[in-house]
Image: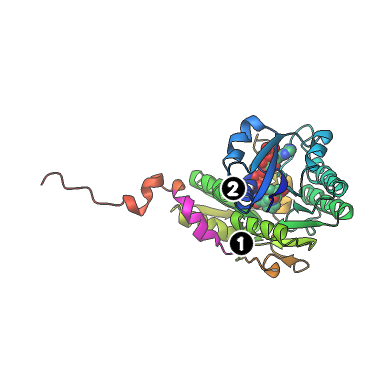
C-alpha cells in the first residue's frame, strides 16, 4: 500500500520526536517543517526510518512556502507552541491563534483527510492567562474552518527529553529550598510522551473526528507530590516551602526576565487551575487508548543522572572492589 504523507509543524520538539518514530514505523511518510534545518535537521532525520522523512525549512509567516507543502499532504499535525512570549513576532496570538488558523484554512483548501492540532488542558477555565486565551481562540477558528479536525488537549507531557521533569530535577538538585506555588495543591495528570503519540496515531489511523479529546495520564498528582517523587528519585532532601502569592508574583516578575524564563507571570496565573480532565470532553481512555505509563516508574529510568554519582549511582556499579592484597 502506498504510504500516506503527513505534514508535521513543530516536529523537532519533545512530542515531535516520539511522533516521527511512531508514524514512520507505521508506514506513514512525514514532511517535518522546522525554522532551522541546520540546527534541527540531523536530529529530525535520525528519529525514524530512512526514506520516510523529508525536512523543509520555513517560518510561520512564509505563507506561500507553507501552502506549497499542502499539495502533496494527506494529513497535517500542528505541534508548534510556546510557553512564554519573546520579542518580535513570537507572541501567543501569532503562534497559537493566527498560525493554526492558517493551517486549518489550507487543510480545507487542499482537502486533507485530517488535521490534528495540539492544544492544552484547562484552557476553558484559565480565563486570565494569555497562553490559554490564545490557545482557545486558535481552537475556535480551526473548528470553524475545517470539520475534519481533532484537537488534542494534553495535561503536562513528560519524557526523558521534556522541559518538565528534567528541569525540576535540575532545580531541585541545585536549590536548598523550593517554592510551592498555591501551596503545591494544583493537580496534574502527567501523560508520557509515548502514550500521547499512541493517541495521535490512533486518531489519525482510525480517522476519529471527535472534535476535542483530553489526553491525560493514569494518575492524579499534585504539584507537591510531583516534587516529592522527584526528590525521592534523585535521593535529595529539600525544603518545599509554600510561598504567599504576592511574593510568588514578585519572583515571577524577576524570573521572566531570564533569557529562558523559569516562571512567568502568565504561567503563575495558569498554575492556579487544576490540570485534570474536565468531564466535558472525551478523554483518551474513552476513545480506547488508555495511558499505561506512570510518572514515577518512567522518570526512574532517567532520573539517576541527577543523583550523586550520576550513572555510577546505579546498582550495577555497587560491586565490592577486588581485594588486591591477597
Ligand atoms: N509539553 C507539554 O507538557 C505540553 C502540554 C500541553 C500542550 N502541549 C502542546 O503540544 C505542542 C507540542 O509540545 P512540545 O512539548 O513538543 O513542544 P516543544 O518541544 O517546545 O516543541 C515545539 C516546536 O515548536 C516550534 N516552535 C517553537 N517556537 C516557535 C516559534 N516561535 N515559531 C515557530 N515555531 C516554533 C519548534 O520547532 P522548530 O524549532 O523546529 O521550528 C519546536 O520544536 C505545543 O503546541 C504545546 O503547547 C505541550
| Coordinates of residue 111 in the picture (x, y in percent) | 85, 50
Question: Does the CB distance between marks 1 and 2 fall below 8 Å?
Answer: no
Outermost residue, front direction? 1
Q: Is residue 297 magenta?
A: yes
Q: Quadrant of ligand 1?
A: top right
Question: Which residue carries the number 1 mark?
Answer: 222
Does any portion of residue 239 appear in the rendered image? yes
Residue at image x 30%, y 52%?
318
Label 1's element? strand
Q: Secondary structure at mark 2?
A: loop
Q: Residue 296: image x %, image y %? A: 51, 60
- Per the rendered image, the range of residues in magenta is 292-304
Between 137 and 254, the one nearer to me in the picture: 137
Q: Earlier in the sequence, mark 1 or mark 2?
A: 2
CA gap, disc 1 and disc 2: 19 Å
In the rendered view, would you say 103 is above or below 222? above
Report the disc number at residue 138. none
Circle 2 residue: 162
Does any atom of ligand 1 lie closer than 8 Å to the CB of label 2? yes
Number of numbered markers:
2
Q: Residue at x 78, y 42 (%)?
A: 95
Q: Nearer the viewer, residue 35 or 166?
A: 35
241 horizontally vs 54: left or right:
left
> For the residue carrying disc 1, how many other residues have a C-alpha within 10 Å: few (<14), some (14-19), or many (20+)?
some
Amino acid at each position: 500500500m502506498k504510504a500516506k504523507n503527513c505534514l508535521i509543524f513543530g516536529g523537532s520538539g519533545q512530542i515531535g520526536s516520539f511522533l516521527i518514530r511512531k508514524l514512520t514505523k507505521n508506514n506513514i511518510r512525514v514532511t517535518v517543517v522546522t525554522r532551522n534545518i541546520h540546527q534541527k535537521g540531523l536530529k529530525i532525520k535520525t528519529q525514524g526510518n530512512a526514506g520516510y522523512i523529508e525536512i523543509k525549512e520555513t517560518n510561520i509567516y512564509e505563507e506561500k512556502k507553507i501552502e506549497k507543502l499542502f499539495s502533496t499532504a494527506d494529513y497535517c499535525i500542528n505541534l508548534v507552541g510556546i510557553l512564554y512570549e519573546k520579542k518580535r513576532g513570537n507572541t501567543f496570538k501569532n503562534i497559537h491563534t493566527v498560525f493554526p488558523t492558517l493551517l486549518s484554512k489550507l487543510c480545507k483548501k487542499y482537502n486533507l483527510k485530517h488535521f490534528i492540532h495540539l492544544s492544552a488542558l484547562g484552557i476553558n477555565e484559565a480565563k486570565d492567562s494569555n497562553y490559554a486565551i490564545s490557545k482557545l481562540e486558535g481552537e475556535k477558528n480551526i473548528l470553524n474552518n475545517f470539520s475534519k479536525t481533532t484537537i488534542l488537549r494534553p495535561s503536562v507531557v513528560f519524557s526523558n527529553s521534556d522541559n518538565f521533569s528534567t528541569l525540576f530535577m535540575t532545580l531541585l538538585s541545585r536549590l536548598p529550598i523550593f517554592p510551592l506555588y498555591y501551596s503545591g495543591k494544583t493537580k496534574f495528570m502527567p501523560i508520557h510522551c509515548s502514550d500521547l503519540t499512541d493517541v495521535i496515531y490512533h486518531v489519525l489511523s482510525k480517522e476519529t473526528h471527535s472534535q476535542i479529546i483530553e489526553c491525560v495520564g493514569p494518575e492524579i498528582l499534585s504539584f507537591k507530590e510531583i516534587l516529592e517523587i522527584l526528590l525521592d528519585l534523585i535521593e535529595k532532601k529539600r525544603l518545599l516551602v509554600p510561598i504567599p502569592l504576592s511574593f510568588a508574583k514578585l519572583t515571577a516578575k524577576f524570573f521572566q526576565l531570564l533569557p529562558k524564563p523559569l516562571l512567568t507571570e502568565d504561567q503563575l496565573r495558569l498554575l492556579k487551575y487544576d490540570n485534570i480532565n474536565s468531564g466535558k470532553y472525551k478523554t483518551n481512555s474513552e476513545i480506547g487508548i488508555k495511558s499505561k505509563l506512570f510518572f514515577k516508574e518512567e522518570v526512574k529510568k532517567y532520573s539517576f543522572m541527577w543523583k550523586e554519582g550520576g550513572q555510577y549511582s546505579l546498582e550495577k556499579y555497587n560491586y565490592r572492589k577486588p581485594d588486591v592484597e591477597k
